[in-house]
């Protein structure tokens, strides 16, 4: 009986504590700088092109093989505007397969890829799986608009 | 009751009227209290359980085989996904195996951070147990919300350090993936305070509650001999009175440096398992306290780490004390950057094998409690 | 009565019938809204006890949640398993639903707000609220599901077992007040509510009523984690919502009964002559106390097991209820002062608590052993 009263006391005490709920879609919890949502490509403002040279290192290291990289000769290099001889032509990441392991970020030698650390990177529900295959424009769009500054680089 | 039950699915009771039939009941794979996609076929006579047949494998993804196609960095993510409530323990077991094979000396700081995170993870896993167990015992979600409140705080810390709330992928062969955050020590201190409060809340809510005691005591009892014969490990084994904790008995990482006590039960029933876990949480707090005091500065990976991890040929078995028991990784390498054979000894699977013996002869409601007291992770069972 | 005047021109039925019909319709509507409120209130209170917010999305602070739920439940497909017994399955709902509402006929909300004043209203209330187990059995059998059958059997066993201590506790009350009319019992308590004279009876009533309502810790027939909803498992949509509606109406009925019989209803502490407004307020306030207790127990207690449930009813509650009757009889026969009632009943209540306390801790358990050096473990192996 005493234990029962103790239990009831516990719930009564909890009644007067502040609820811990965060009403998710209307309020967003602040997410830490290191948050790893999904990989995105980073835009090089100086040269007005992506950092990515299409070196395939991330593609090879990805455990679930969700990336597809196509490389091309950099036209800007020919014009003398950029030091990158090769540049990314096409880039797909299948977010439906990606296991967000950060390995692609770790292997990239050009700091061209980073993990999205904003809520936009998490709220990716789609009606069709095929819409989760992100192409180069989609991968670059957030960095281009300076919406993301990936924090984690190992 | 129990004598006629062996190996039968539907039995006509002879001594009673012939039309009384023991009915098989299909519990799961979609049942609120099977903790995942697990199915057990219970043969009941009224409320008494005469026979249990567990069916596993609904979540089998061939994780071990997958990991054989992965190099040693890629495999860490899969270790997470196998044991998704004690991810750091799983990662630790995996990297320990590789480190032993490659004979890598892990820097001090990395060791300490590993211990802190693994113990915090033990807290969060046991919180999960407390919450789910409360629901199994029929509490209307109160223990669950209290436990999950604390779990969320713990996950906040994990997220700040590793970047993810669930699949941390933070330990690496040789050390850690990256340095911890600057305010790591304060954050861990904060979360230890809230966790201690959360443990006290759950203690107040459940431990001395007469109904809870009446429900838990003297069901699913296992003697020390039975527990050992069934190959149990972890809190279930200790509740049966066997003081066996890998952190003490075969210290890995740097566990031999910490002073802590191992709670050992006397009756081996569901209530003792609950108590052992509750006490283990307090001991984990003590370990974290000591580890935080001793946390040295320094590198987090050895200086001469090869860029590509290649193991020499050989085999190794590394085991850690995960919140569920002995989590072992058996690794065979023929040289190269991938394991030749990889086998996980998952505590959930081994403990689950005792379910039948524990449940037969108990009430239907107790079957739920006994399964809950095992604290299985179905992904870990099926791999 | 104004209702009768209203009814008279409508149709050429006896006014009495028409008035009763209107009153019942009004009551059903009022109760439906009361239940809607109760679900909202329950969700909010339970949420606070669990440090959550509860429903927040529908309307400000989620006040429209109950309406949203209703719309959703009504719009849902009403499924019947192909192998179910159509008659039992479909009628079970009504076998539970109707008695719960009929019970309200005899409830005196204020001194003269009562649909049908009857001299044996306490008996009527108890008798009618005891009918619902038939519905549970029908639902359990008719669903053709093993879980539903288990749930139905559990419900029947539980409801019948706990009916007995409930009625025995009420017999104690009837002995003290020498009336079977709820109105008279309320009037009897003009100075002191009966909870003071009958603490043991109150305890028994409280536990038995929780069991009759199938709420925690006695929600065994519907136990979510064991039989996954019990008899409700095959029901959906409007039928399922009628079950829920019934269980909340029952909660109101028992809360009202407790408020009338043990807390003095609208009589205590201000007397009868305070007008119906205050009377209604008193009734509702006392009813809320019971409802809060029901919600509170829901968040705090695990569920009992079937055998424990049964032994608690037959080995604890019923003997003590008989003891209460015996004590009351002693006091009545020898015409002892009322205070003796309090002392004996209180002592018996304490004895019951102590008994339960001891029963759980039959043998003192060996506490956990804390081992700091586990090495000797190898010898066990
Ligand atoms: S995060 Fe991991 S899984 Fe995702 S794309 Fe990068 S390497 Fe592949
Ligand atoms: S993201 Fe980095 S690693 Fe991947 S292709 Fe581009 S440059 Fe290479």
Image (cartoon, coloured by chain):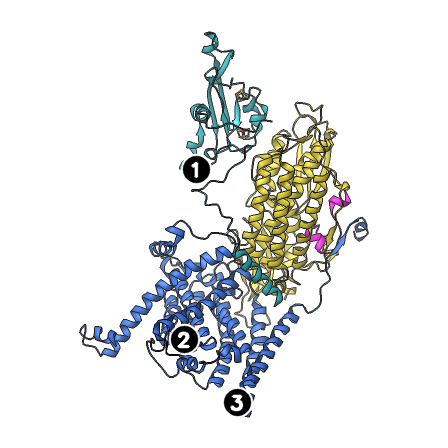
Q: Position of residue B371 (x, y in %)?
A: 60, 55
Please state the extent of the stretch shown in magenta in the rendering: B230-250
Q: Earlier in the sequence, mark 3 or mark 2?
A: 2
Q: Which mark is residue A10?
A: none
A146, C373: nearer the viewer: A146
Is A114 covered by the magenta stretch?
A: no
In this view, B217 is above or below C161: above
Q: Is residue B168 left or right of residue C272?
A: right
Specify whether disc 3 shares its chain with disc 2.
yes
Q: Residues within 10 Å of mark 2 (few under 14, many from 20)?
A: many
Element on which disc 2 rests: loop
Q: Position of residue C29 (x, y in %)?
A: 32, 65
Which subunit holds the residue at mark 1?
Answer: A
Query: Which residue bears the numbered disc 2?
Result: C266
Dot 3 and dot 2 residues touching (CB under 8 Å)? no
Query: Which residue bears the numbered disc 3?
Result: C332
Q: Is residue B275 left or right of residue A15?
A: right
Q: Is residue C36 left or right of residue B301?
A: left
Which subunit holds the residue at mark 2?
Answer: C
C206, B9: nearer the viewer: C206
Element on which disc 3 rests: helix
Query: Which residue bears the numbered disc 1?
Result: A125
Q: Colour of chain B?
A: yellow
Q: Is the residue at mark 1 in contact range of ligand 1, meaning its CB lies under 8 Å from it?
A: no
Foreground label between 2 and 1 = 2
Q: How many marks?
A: 3
Q: Position of residue C193 (x, y in %)?
A: 48, 78
């Amino acid at each position: 009986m005493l234990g029962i009263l103790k239990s009831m006391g516990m719930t009564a005490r909890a009644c007067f504590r502040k609820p811990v709920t965060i009403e998710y879609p209307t309020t967003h919890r602040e997410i830490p700088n290191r948050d790893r949502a999904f990989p995105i490509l980073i835009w090089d403002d100086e040269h007005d092109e992506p950092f990515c040279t299409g070196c395939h290192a991330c593609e090879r290291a990805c455990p679930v093989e969700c990336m597809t990289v196509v490389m091309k000769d950099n036209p800007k290099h020919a014009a003398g505007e950029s030091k990158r001889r090769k540049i990314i032509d096409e880039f797909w990441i299948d977010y439906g397969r990606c296991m967000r392991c950060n390995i692609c970020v770790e292997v990239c030698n050009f700091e061209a890829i980073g993990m999205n650390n904003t809520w936009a990177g998490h709220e990716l529900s789609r009606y069709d799986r095929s819409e989760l295959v992100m192409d180069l424009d989609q991968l670059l769009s957030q960095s281009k608009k300076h919406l993301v500054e990936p924090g984690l680089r190992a | 009751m129990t004598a006629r039950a062996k190996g039968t699915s539907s039995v006509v009771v002879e001594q009673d009227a012939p039309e009384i039939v023991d009915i098989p009941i299909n519990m799961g794979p979609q049942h609120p209290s099977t903790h995942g996609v697990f199915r057990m076929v219970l043969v009941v006579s009224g409320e008494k359980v005469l026979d249990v047949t567990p069916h596993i494998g609904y979540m089998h993804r061939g994780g071990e085989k997958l990991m054989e196609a992965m190099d040693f960095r890629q495999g860490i993510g899969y270790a997470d996904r196998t044991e998704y409530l004690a991810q750091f323990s799983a990662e630790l077991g995996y990297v320990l195996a590789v480190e032993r094979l490659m004979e890598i000396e892990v820097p001090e700081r990395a060791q300490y951070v590993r211990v802190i995170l693994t113990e915090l993870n033990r807290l969060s896993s046991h919180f999960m147990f407390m919450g789910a167990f409360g629901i199994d015992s029929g509490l209307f979600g109160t223990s669950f919300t209290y436990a999950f409140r604390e779990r969320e705080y713990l996950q906040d810390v994990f997220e700040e350090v590793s970047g993810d709330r669930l699949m941390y992928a933070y330990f690496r062969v040789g050390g850690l993936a990256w340095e911890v955050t600057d305010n790591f020590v304060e954050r861990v201190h904060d979360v230890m305070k809230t966790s201690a409060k959360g443990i006290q809340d759950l203690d107040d809510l459940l431990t001395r509650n007469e109904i809870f005691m009446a429900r838990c005591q003297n069901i699913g009892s296992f003697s020390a001999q039975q527990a050992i014969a069934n190959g149990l490990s972890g809190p279930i084994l200790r509740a049966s009175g066997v003081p066996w904790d890998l952190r003490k008995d075969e210290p890995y990482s740097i566990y031999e440096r910490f002073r802590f006590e191992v709670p050992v039960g006397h009756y081996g029933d569901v209530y003792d398992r609950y108590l052992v876990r509750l006490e283990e949480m307090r001991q984990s707090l003590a370990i974290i306290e000591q580890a935080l005091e001793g946390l040295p500065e320094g590198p987090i990976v050895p200086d001469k780490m090869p860029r590509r991890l290649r193991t020499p040929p050989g085999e190794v078995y590394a085991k850690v004390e995960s919140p569920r028991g002995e989590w072992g990784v058996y690794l065979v390498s023929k040289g190269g950057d991938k394991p030749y054979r990889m086998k996980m000894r998952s505590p959930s699977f081994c403990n689950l094998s005792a379910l039948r013996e524990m449940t037969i002869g108990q009430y239907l409601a107790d079957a739920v409690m006994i399964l809950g007291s095992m604290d299985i992770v179905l992904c870990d069972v099926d791999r | 009565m104004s209702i009768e005047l209203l009814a008279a021109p409508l149709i050429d039925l006896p006014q009495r019938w028409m008035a009763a019909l209107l009153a019942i319709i009004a009551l059903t509507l009022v109760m439906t809204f009361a239940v809607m409120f109760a679900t909202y209130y329950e969700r909010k209170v339970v949420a606070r006890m669990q440090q959550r917010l509860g429903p927040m999305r529908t309307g400000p602070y989620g006040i429209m949640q109950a309406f949203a739920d209703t719309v959703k439940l009504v719009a849902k497909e009403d499924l019947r398993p192909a192998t179910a017994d159509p008659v039992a399955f479909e009628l079970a709902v009504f076998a539970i639903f109707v008695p719960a509402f009929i019970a309200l006929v005899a409830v005196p909300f204020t001194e003269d707000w009562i649909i049908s004043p009857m001299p044996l209203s306490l008996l009527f209330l108890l008798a009618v609220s005891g009918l619902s187990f038939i519905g549970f059995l029908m639902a359990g059998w008719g669903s053709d599901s093993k879980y539903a059958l288990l749930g139905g059997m559990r419900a029947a066993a539980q409801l019948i077992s706990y009916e007995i201590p409930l009625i025995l506790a009420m017999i104690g009350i009837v002995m003290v007040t020498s009336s079977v009319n709820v109105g008279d019992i309320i009037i009897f308590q003009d100075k002191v509510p009966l909870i003071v004279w009958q603490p043991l009876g109150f305890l028994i009533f409280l536990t038995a009523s929780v069991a009759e309502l199938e709420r925690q810790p006695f929600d065994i027939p519907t136990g979510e984690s064991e039989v996954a909803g019990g008899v409700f498992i095959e029901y959906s949509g409007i039928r399922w919502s009628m079950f829920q509606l019934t269980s909340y109406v029952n909660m109101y009925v028992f809360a009202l009964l407790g408020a009338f019989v043990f807390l003095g209803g609208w009589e205590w502490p201000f007397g009868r002559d305070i007008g119906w407004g205050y009377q209604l307020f008193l009734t509702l306030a006392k009813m809320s106390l019971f409802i809060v207790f029901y919600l509170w127990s829901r968040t705090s207690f695990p569920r009992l097991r079937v055998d424990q449930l049964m032994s608690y009813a037959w080995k604890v509650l019923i003997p003590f209820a008989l003891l209460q009757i015996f004590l009351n009889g002693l006091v009545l026969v020898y015409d002892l002062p009322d205070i003796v009632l309090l002392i004996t009943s209180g002592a018996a209540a304490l004895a019951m608590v102590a008994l339960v306390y001891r029963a759980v801790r039959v043998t003192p358990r060996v506490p956990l052993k804390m081992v700091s050096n586990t090495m000797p473990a190898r010898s066990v192996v």
